Image: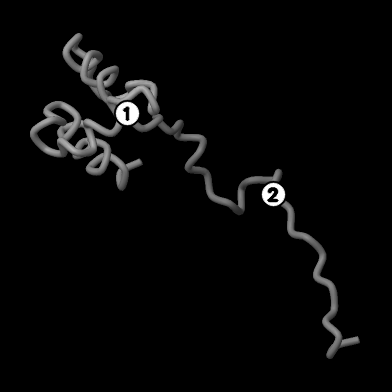
Amino acid sequence: MAQLKPLISMIFDCCQDARKHHSAVFEKYASQKFKKAATYVQAEIKKGFQISFPSPPMLRSSQFADVEDDDSLSVLPRHPTACEA
């Protein structure tokens, strides 16, 4: 998610004034062929749409237990290779 935040923010900034940033793209997606997507996005932003990024989940201290202490982990049996057989 950390890698996507700058991209999402940049796209959102461009959408806030789409006619200025990319007028040809705005006009294309404002057409009926694209269900007037550009005008819909513009209207939603004018209504106050904001992007909010969820905070990372909190980890419980039990999730930091050593792997050696975790009895639920198991190692699969090793199969001999063709050279060993």
On-image quarter of the C terminus: bottom right
Amino acid type for the residue under numbered disc 2 = Leu
Q: Secondary structure at mark 1?
A: loop
Amino acid type for the residue under numbered disc 1 = Ser
Extreme residue toward the front, this view: 32
Position above or below: 66 against 32:
below
| Mark-to-mark CA distance, 1 and 2 | 29 Å
Dot in front, 1 or 2 = 1
Alpha-carbon neighbours of circle 1 within 10 Å: few (<14), some, or many (≥20)? Answer: few
Extreme residue toward the bottom, this view: 83
Q: Nearer the viewer, residue 3 or 76?
A: 3
Q: Nearer the viewer, residue 42 or 35?
A: 35
| The disc label shown at residue 55, or none | 1
In the image, what residue occupies the spot 15% across and 26% down? 16
Which residue corresponds to mark 2?
Answer: 73
Q: Where's residue 3, x and y in %? A: 31, 47
Q: Secondary structure at mark 2?
A: loop
Dots 1, 2 in contact, CB < 8 A? no
Q: Is residue 57 left or right of residue 65?
A: left
In the image, what residue occupies the spot 16% across and 35% down? 14
Q: Nearer the viewer, residue 81 or 46?
A: 46
Q: Where's residue 45, x and y in %? A: 20, 17
The quarter holding residue 19 reads top left
State the colouring used for the structure image.
one colour
Position above or below: 6 against 12:
below
On-image quarter of the N terminus: top left
Extreme residue toward the left, this view: 20
| First reached walking from the N terminus: tag 1 or tag 2 | 1
In the image, what residue occupies the spot 15% across and 33% down? 13
Q: Where's residue 30, x and y in %? A: 27, 25
